[in-house]
Amino acid sequence: MSELTIVVAAFNRRHSLERCLRALLHAAYPGKVRLVISIDHCETNGPVRELAHQFVWPFGRKRVIAHEERLGLRNHIMKCGNLALRYGRILLLEDDLFVSPDYYNYALQAVQYYEHDKRIAGISLYAPRFNESAKLPFEPLQGRYDVYFGQLPTSWGQIWTASQWAAYKAWYDNADNLLHKQWDKEALPRCVARWPESSWKKYYAKYMIDENKVFVYPYVSHSTNFGDVGTHFRNRAHHFQVPLSNADKKQYVFDPYDRASVVYDASFENIGLGRLFERQMRSQLTIDLYGTKQASRYSRYVLTTKPLDYRILGKFDLTMKPLEENIRHSIPGNSIFLYDTTVPRPFAADSEPILLEQYFSWEKIKTRSQ
């Protein structure tokens, strides 16, 4: 199977849908490609339905689904996701997104590479530059590949195969997974747990954490978000705009997850930092450089920017970007701290940092840096 069906989810923003469809027209396609425009019901979205029906798609078949009842955003995305079960593979775009000219080429190569890996929950077109938990800029650690991995799903351009969506749907249809009163506090970053019930992404994030799955993210984005006023934006939001790829029919290089070099957890913390430390410390280490994790869930050793009343084993700077580079290169400073939470600071022998060389596995650092 070579085709990847494009699904555009729309509601009542005609100008958004028109802009999105225009971007699709300017992209490159290897052959016939199916387009589905799914429109949630609204008494005033006649112009949206008219645009969808009149739009000419010269690259293959076009289908318009105009739902007869109001679904709401979460249920609408569920309906769109179910199309993966019918078509085998879908690329889902919300109407306020814009794509790069090479987005379909990237998407097709990525899905062909990862579709049989059950640890992959989806593939992102979007390359985030904002940490939603910390409300701060985010820069991923650079690697030799065109992609990295993260344990938070994207809602701004994603690819699902039938098997990926079927696995999620089975989890979602199990009421115990959705109705557990404490699940948001136990598993999710606090900001994600506070997302409204209209957010499908909140549930997908819980699923990924429960099942230990990841999303594939590109370093250079193939979609960007205009943040038009809608269900989740009362005012137009520009801070989710990211630079788009200008690649032309590029051959992308993908990272096998078995040897994943860059992986972020749901709080945008680099899981791979643990590999820099010796095995005993690594197994008891919490990474919290953005300072968003709950202290009650810390392990014995904590690497964080938070001031804590525990013995300090090491101090690092924040000058290098991304943040974890200060750890990887052992840049001294007074912004990031490595704590031992078993020793309260007032009773520690001294407050000066211990030489970190005894904790690092330098051979691991050299290997991962090459």
Image (cartoon, rainbow, N blue to C red):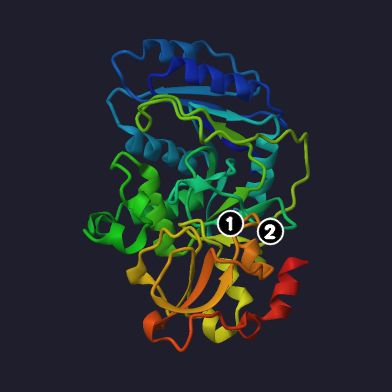
Q: Position of residue 29 (x, y in %)?
A: 70, 30
Residue 257 against residue 159 in the figure, above or below: below
Please provide percent x and percent y for residue 250: 78, 40
On screen, residue 42 versus residue 357, left or right, reads left
Q: Do the residues under discs 2 and 1 have CB atoms within 8 angstroms?
A: yes
Using the image, tell me which numbered label, if any, was put on residue 137: none
- Residue on which disc 2 sits: 255
Which amino acid is tagged 2? Asp
Q: Residue at x 36, y 68 (%)?
A: 295
x then y, percent, for residue 42: 30, 19
Q: Amino acid at mark 1?
A: Phe
Q: Circle 1 sits on which residue?
A: 149
Whether 69 is drawn above or below 217: the answer is above
Residue 161 showing in the rendered view: no
The residue at the point 35 percent across, 34 percent down is 73
For the residue labelled by badge 1, is the local secondary structure a helix, a strand or a loop? strand
User: Measured along the vertical axis of the image, is residue 292 above or below residue 302?
Assistant: above
Residue sitting at x 63%, y 29%: 33
66 lies above or below 175: above
Which residue is at a point 30% across and 22% down the rendered structure image?
68
Instruction: Name the residue nearer the viewer: 246 or 166.
Output: 246
Looking at the figure, which quarter contains the C terminus?
bottom right
